[in-house]
Structure formats: C-alpha cells, structure tokens
Image (cartoon, rainbow, N blue to C red):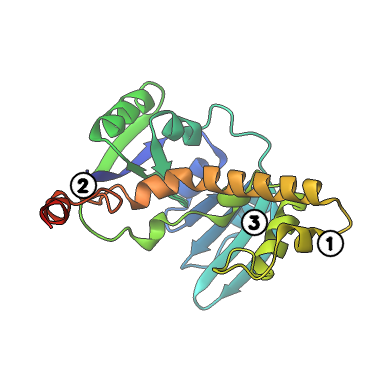
Amino acid sequence: MSLYEASFRVKHECPYREISEHYPDLTIREWYLSDCQVVEITSPGSPTDDLLDKIDDLGSVLHKSIDESGLHVVTQSCLCSLEDSIIERFEEYNCLYQPPTIHRQGWEHYTVIAFDESDVRALHTDLETDRDVEVLSKTAITEQEIPHSMLAPVDQLFETVTDRQMAALRLALESGYYEQPRKTSLRELADRTAIARSTYEEHLRKAENKLLTNAGQFLRLVTATSTSDPLQVDETHQAEQAAD
C-alpha cells in the first residue's frame, strides 16, 4: 500500500495573504492549536513601521526581535472556529494536514498525506471551486520510514481527554501500572486519590479509550507502508508444524 504526499499552494482572501503579497521577503508560518493559532513571522530585512503595525493587529505578540539577521515575531490569536476552513476539507477527503501552513508572496502553502491518490485528486477538484490552486508536487511514499514531519502533534492526541482523566492516566503510568509485570493495582491507585475505585477506573478507561481513538489515524499512517501482517500466521511455518 502506498501513501501519497501532496504539496500545493492556494490563493484566497485572508489576513496573511495581503501581508505576504505586499512584503515578498516575508515568510509566515501558521500552526493551529486546540483553541488558538500561533504564527511565526520572519524576514531577512529591517521591517517598516507599517509592517510592524500590521503584525500587531494579527494577535498578541509573544516574541519580537529585530537584529542583523532580520525580523522574528511570534504571535498568538484566538481560534474561534475552523468552520468551513480548508483544514476541514482535508479531513473530508481523508487527507492528513501537515503543519505548518506557510504564507509567502500572497500564497498559502500546504502539505497533506493521503492514503489513496484518488483522495488527492478529489481534494484538488474541490478546492478549485472557490480559490486558485496550484499543485507543486505529488509523491508516492512506499516501503520507507515515515518522516518525522508526519508525527502526531501532542495536542491532537490529548485534545479530548479531561483534566481528571489525564491525572488518572499519569498516576497509573508513573506508578508502573502499565509495566510487565504490573507494579500496582487499580485498588492501590484509587487508594492514593480522594475518589472511589470505580470512579478512578472509569476516568482511567475513558482516558485510554480517547487516547487510542485519537491516535488511530496515526496508527493507520505508520503501518500503511507495511507489506506484511506480523500477526498473520506464516503459511510455510504452519505447514512445517503440521508435518512434524
């Protein structure tokens, strides 16, 4: 089975498009977190006052430096909703978005990983309906190690796990509950908390279920290029055993 990595750029109206178009030396990298977006802005040259004003309007400035290497700014802003966003379209076509989004010279640059080439084609067709799209590359990934750029962001793995479920999971992990042989029991873990054993177990099981569910797409990803099933009985070995 092959995976497909596709890189493309799109152009439509957004705050970063105008800035990157007017300042061609500027590079804007954008990350979506669970409830906000973080933007890194770099430029090799000295910024104008007008550019600095535009950057201040993008969100809260977390870091700003201007030296001989140029401009480096990191901002954070509220991510109220991703409704009808391009990220949602990736998900509709079973494509895994690979952050960050890069804005340069009026274009947004994206990279996605797909499990089927037809999904990439369908996504491209859909995006063409309301924005300019140019495919920059499309490469089959077969029988090779999954690149580190495709590792799961931590916030995606834990985004649905509550604080109590997280605490229950951490206590179990740090107490050796998941080691073989186990170093503790559910009852012993619950005794170290202020809640009943049944309640503690419920928090722990829900945390485990959510974590594995969130990791499911990435599990599918890292096993997609495997040419064999390690759980499948080898027919030759099975025949030899039968002969004995």
Q: Nearer the viewer, residue 50 or 144?
A: 144
Number of labelled discs? Answer: 3
Give me the C-alpha separation between circle 3 and circle 1: 44 Å
Residue at horizontal 77 percent and vertical 51 percent from the top: 200
User: In the rendered view, would you say 133 is above or below 77?
Assistant: above
x, y percentage for residue 172?
Answer: 68, 62
Disc 3 secondary structure class = strand
Residue at horizontal 51 percent and vertical 78 percent from the top: 68
Instruction: Identify which amino acid the numbered label 3 is placed on.
Output: Thr
**Crowding at mark 3 (Cα within 10 Å: few <14, some 14-19, many 20+):** many
**Label ID, residue 75:** 3
Give me the C-alpha separation between circle 1 and circle 2: 52 Å
Residue 169 quadrant = bottom right
**Label ID, residue 140:** 2
Going by the image, does 133 lie left or right of 240? right
Residue at horizontal 73 percent and vertical 49 percent from the top: 201
**Label ID, residue 191:** 1
Mark 3 and mark 2 in contact? Answer it, CB < 8 Å: no
User: In the rendered view, would you say 218 is above or below 125?
Assistant: below
Instruction: Identify which amino acid the numbered label 2 is placed on.
Output: Ala
Res. 105 in view: no
Instruction: Identify which amino acid the numbered label 1 is placed on.
Output: Asp
- Taking the view exactly as shown, the residue that stands out farthest to the bottom is 68
Res. 65 in view: yes
User: In the rendered view, would you say 227 is above or below 177?
Assistant: above
